[in-house]
Amino acid sequence: MTTLTEDQRAIRDMADAFTADRITPFAAEWDEAKTWPADVARAAGELGFGSIYVGEDHGGCGLTRVESALVFEALAYGCPSTSAMLSIHNMATWMIDRFGADDVRARLVPRLATLEAMASYCLTEPGAGSDAASLKTRAVRDGDHYVLNGAKAFISGGGVSDVYVVMARTSDDGARGITCFAVEKGTPGLSFGAEEKKLGWHSQPTAAVMFDDCRVPAANRIGDEGQGFKIAMQGLDGGRLNIAACSLGGARRALDEAVVYTKDRRQFGKAIADFQNTQFRLADMATALEASRLMLYSAAEKVTAKAADASAAAAMAKRFVTDTAFDVTNQALQLFGGYGYLMDYPIERILRDLRVHQILEGTNEIMRVVIARELLKD
């Protein structure tokens, strides 16, 4: 895809305007204070940004993954951390809407769709990172409930979100023994660790999520027993596109800031933008971001269409875009020189925020595993 439709341009413009008004002027403050802007999230929900590709029957927008990419790139231009949190919420909400039974969808999705409530995604454990199928959190059926015991690590929204989409083991049959649950905040036995101290992503809380004889109604099971890992991976196809879009938005902001700075900064009697070395670097940065955007849109179309190679395409986009965006941001910081290292400018914050995008939603090394598996399959 090379040309946006009129509706897609309107969605992008709406997201750009919201970012300029409600996110960009305040992002540095949220970062410094380590504050989640709940009011801004609710305002984003009023525009439909909490349920971009969630079905319309319970309040979602029913749009495609391309529109999702447009929105998260726009929001990340102001604050990658805040945009990423909203992207994870969209992924978790979609999982409930796509695979949940009618009653749990009717009960949970409307509030999640408007961002009146927040959702988190709980797969990673202290001993199960890239090897996600080795997770140990266990769910045992007890009448009309499942009893969960275990812990999840590095959970965005931990302690703040209202719903936790949790993968837990219901049998010892490897990946086929994992089941998905929607665990609501306030459920007895659900608790949270201390907020993690992180390099970046300061505007959103990250904490362990713990289950100690946590009794979850069987009605809150998402999908059938044993479907959890498949559901988790399908969620991650979209999540990988979303986080790539967040990287793209942050890097685009870094490039724009570098263009303005190099025009203004003078050394050796002229603006540093007048040096051919600077011009070549800026040109390469812009080219790399445009290539990233086209790859992202192509992967988004494949995931929307449920193409046979959708997972590999999402992995390619996640790997390429997040690596490229971090490199572009790092080059922007270099163009700023020592000033880029200061918090007076947004470059260092963007750099800190984008670094984790190469790790979460599947490390970029695991993305290569996914891609190679597709290439080498019989």
Image (spheres, rainbow, N blue to C red):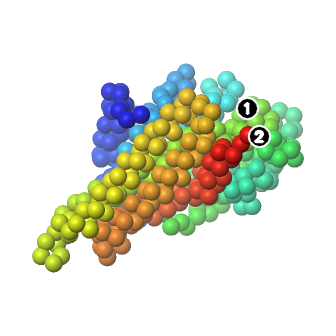
Residue drawn at x 20%, y 68% is 275
Within 10 angstroms of label 2, few (less than 14), some, or many (20 or more) residues? Answer: many
Gap in angstroms between the C-alphas marked 1 and 2: 8 Å
User: Tag 1: residue type?
Assistant: Gly
Q: Quadrant of the N terminus?
A: top left
What secondary structure is marked by label 2? strand
Residue drawn at x 47%, y 51% is 321
What secondary structure is marked by label 1? loop
Residue drawn at x 28%, y 62% is 280
User: Tag 2: residue type?
Assistant: Thr
CB within 8 Å, label 1 to label 2? yes
Point out residue 331 in the picture as x, y percentages from the top left corner. 37, 66
Nearer to the camera, 78 or 338? 338
Within 10 angstroms of label 1, few (less than 14), some, or many (20 or more) residues? Answer: some
Residue drawn at x 50%, y 52% is 320
Residue corresponding to mark 2: 179
Asked if one can make out residue 78 in the rendered structure from this viewpoint, the answer is no
Q: Which mark, by number, is residue 223?
A: 1
Point out residue 195 in the picture as x, y percentages from the top left corner. 58, 62
